[in-house]
Amino acid sequence: MDGLLAQLITAAFLATFIRSLVPLLLTALGGLFSERSGVVNIALDGLIIFGALGGAVTTLLLQPALGSAAPWAGWVGGALIGGLIAWIHAVVSIKYRADQVISGTAINLLAAGVPPVILTALYDSSTESPKVANALPLWGVGELRFSPPVYFAFLAVAVTWYVLYRTPFGLRLRATGEQPGAAASMGINVRRMRYTAVILSGVLAGTAGVFLSIGNLDSYVRNISAGGGFIALAALIFGQWKPLGVLGATVLFGFLQALSIALGGGDLLPPTLVQALPYLITILALIFTGRSRAPRALGRPYDG
Amino acid sequence: MNPVAVFGPYNTRVTHNTQSRPSGDASRVALIACAVAAAGMLLFPLAALGRGFSADAVLLHLSGSVLNLANNQQAPQADPGNALALGWATLAMIAVTLIGAVRRAGWFWITGLLATVLAVTAVLVLDNGLAAQIERVAADTSLRAGTRRQLRNFYDGGGMNLGLFLPLLAGLIAAGAGLSARPWVMDRFNRLRGLLVPVSAITLAVLVGAVVVLMVQPSVNPTDQALTLWQGWLAKSDVVYFVYSTLFAPVTRLSPLLSSLKLATPLIFTGLSVAFAFRTGLFNIGAPGQLTMGAIGAMLMGVYGPPSLGWALLPLSVLAAAAGGALWGAIPGLLKARFGSSEVINTIMLNYVASAVFIFMIGSETFAFLGKEYPLPFKAPGFEAKSQELQPTAQLPTLLDLFNVGPVGGGYVLSIGIVVALIALLIARFLLRAVKNGGLIAVVIAVVAGALTWRIGLPANVNGSQLNASFLIALVCVALFGTLMWRTATGYALRAVGLSPRAAEYGGISVARGTILAMTLAGMFAGLAGTHYVNGGALDEYRLKGNMPVNVGFDGIAVALMGQNTPTGVVLASLLFGTVDTGGVDVDQQLEAVNKDIVTVLKALIVLFIAAGGFLSRRLVDPPPPQLVAATDRTGTDEGGRLSPGVAAQQAGTPNPNVGQSSEENTREGGK
């Protein structure tokens, strides 16, 4: 056990921890916007995948023209793709009043089918893209060097908190999720708020994907999200739909993921079973959250 | 019944026409269909006069021009015969129908039907020409066997193309729309209204898929001849037709049909699983995990069960599969009932856990625990991740072996007993429909007829197929689903929970119990899919194998939604998806840039479009009951599409049914 403890307080572990935490944090913040406006976003996992794919493909396409600036364009591309796909979810669930869970699942299913089709057409491989020449740069010191989305993620927590609680937009957003009827009577355009929130969630989840594909790795690989979108959703529930709560929950889940990565290398527990740990912990966490304080209009189409 | 009598004398706005003129909507449908067909005939190739293996084709356009992109440029061209003339006649008929639809004439169903007949004749004439070529090739002894086979396949691959398919379909649509003016036809259509959303979703998915194919696949042109813009377009559109005709082709021949049924079997299980949970207001995304645990259960019992049990091992193994899945379904059910945690997230998480357990069990022969290595007995020696082989008594027979009544090892002679029994059942049901217990008598008659004809067989030319008896288990599950849901008090309770948890609770039904039960049974259905892979050897070996396609669990969502959460619907949707899956493999082989994941995209799109209600208006999909329409018509206060049911019902003097609103309120409560 001593060996493990010593392993846990190294800078390398801290780096692993932060790398596991960031995609969850970004995605969960995205989910926060969407769900606070009253739209269930189970599509987060698919949005990560689309963002990762969009980031890698944009970088690869613009590489000859832009050189080392290409990954930045890739970031924009991935975030935009994430926003675009989220817009589809928004149209189907807001305009066409679909069951939001089913429509989100459809996006997740699309995320399983579309990347292989695009990769086959572009690069003749159904599972991964070629490596990009330049990934996003790494900033920091020593072993603690991270790509920009990491810093962006922590900034995003503060910004989200400020926007949600200190701006008119945040007030309207929360009102839309709690009492859309009341919000509408005060002159808030409920649909537009919801569209904005869902697209924003796509942009943030897309950024998480960009971090995974060209921030953490240097190519898109199949199943890149590894269910992170769902864990982020659980973190959102565990964090009670509050920015700081979400930060706390993702820190917990990120730590457990990093722990399972650290344990996976050792011979303490079977590595294949250790991989299941974050998912088991998620289930446990949801038990203790119980009937949580979800936005009251969550999951209900608004007809106005 | 005379519509006037129903609506009363105050009927000011005509809803159901008393003259036999089609309604505005129906004519508009016919108009659009005919316009699309006419444009399609001019813009797309009429037919392929032959097609090589890599989808290279000789394309014939309505204008008579031929575009030869075949790899084998020397192959003599098949004679299209009168197909061109028939094509022009079809176009003329479509044009006449179009005019009829614009004028909302009562006769355009006749011309629509004629257009279809003409198009079908053109297809037959074409096929005749191709068949003549095949005969010529077969008789030509100067060719080598390989060349002969190649040429035969080349002509066999030809046939109609978009230019004939579209008018064929449009003619039928126009005929249907025209006939809908008659009340008896309208009644039929009304009964089929439930199909509107799935059909519209498939159509839209096919259209979007076509755009995807157009974008990713360059036109097939192995000859390297420079194509003009027009020729390039023809070649491109041919690729789209080729993809879809290949996707849906497996129904037409026995061997691919069997593989479709094989691929459909696990979809039936997982579709039933998702549908069962849906009926109780729960969303089961955990079918992949439940399937995995079911397969593990079947493997454990099948490999390690005591051999002394003999034949009893097989049912025990099947039960173990059911139990494994049920356990994995019960967990999220319990968590939801006890702690209120969302079953959606929990089932997804359990998928990952199941996958970890799966890899743990068959991925390696040893495992490390607290610093020591322990042996693990499940994995068979070798590189591949797979379990030990099942005992022979735990293996399910293939259906071909089950129905083979010929001598052992002498090709397949398939018993006609089942078909006879089915036909007997249908006829007896129809004849005895007025008799008490007629259904039961019909079943007895069917069983007797099947038993009598069991030994009579038809020789079938078919390669071995791993379609196995788990297909029959699936059918039993379908029957179980139907009986349990609609013929027992438990099923009534479950459906009540699904429609309105609060009302169910008020009526004395335990929502918690219903939730646990529904998830357990849903898990059981998905777990039984494990028997298909393990006991049935669908992956060519009677083992639990690492390449088990657990994603069929997610396909179950699409199947359940397509099938409208009814057992029959699930079976039909599974057959459709099984067919498309089989065709997807062919497309993958024949085209370079399109792989079989296009099928996954199509399924996802279908789910998306069904979720959006097929983008159809509510008035079309779920029209208000006729009394309400009549009531609003009488008062004349509201628009047809937007009547408020409450007001209308009060004025009609009936108790307020609260249609539309109550069901929605309750689905919200059913959600998280």
Image (cartoon, rainbow, N blue to C red):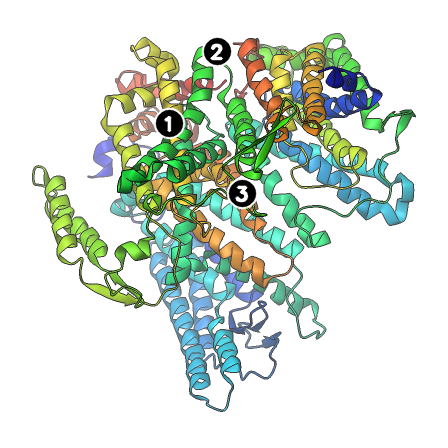
Label 2 secondary element: helix
Q: Residue at x 19, y 54 (%)?
A: B423
**Chain identifier of the residue bearing label 3 in the image:** B
**Which residue shows up at 90% across the image and 24% down it?**
A140
Image quadrant holding the N terminus of chain B, namely top left
Pinpoint residue A206: horizontal percent, then vertical percent: 72, 31
Could you give the CA–CA distance between mark 3 and mark 2, rounded to whole angstroms? 34 Å
Query: For residue A269, what is the image quadrant?
Result: top right
Residues under numbered marks 2 and 1 in contact, where contact means CB atoms less than 8 Å apart: no
Q: Who comes first in sequence, dot 1 or dot 3?
A: 1
Distance from the alpha carbon under mark 1 to that under mark 3: 32 Å
Circle 1 chain: B
Evaluate if marks 1 and 3 touch, with contact meaning CB atoms under 8 Å apart.
Answer: no
Q: Indicate whether A289 appears above or below A220.
A: above
The nearer-to-camera label among 2 and 1 is 2
**Amino acid type indicated by mark 2:** Phe
User: Which chain's residue wears label 2?
Assistant: B
Q: In the image, which is nearer the foreground, mark 1 or mark 3? A: 3
Callout 3, which amino acid? Gly
Left or right, B444 with reference to A261? left
Q: Quadrant of residue A279?
A: top right
Q: Position of residue B668 (x, y in %)?
A: 46, 18
Mark 3 vs 2, N-terminal side:
2
Q: Which residue is mark 3?
A: B546
Q: Position of residue A33 (x, y in %)?
A: 67, 19
Going 52% across and 22% down the picture, which residue do you hit? B346
Q: Which mark is residue B279?
A: 1
- The tag on residue B339 is 2
Few, some or many C-alpha atoms within 10 Å of disc 2 (few <14, some 14-19, many ≥20)? Answer: some
Q: Quick check: marks 3 and 2 in contact, CB under 8 Å?
A: no
Q: Are marks 3 and 2 on the same chain?
A: yes
Residue B171 visible in the shown view: no
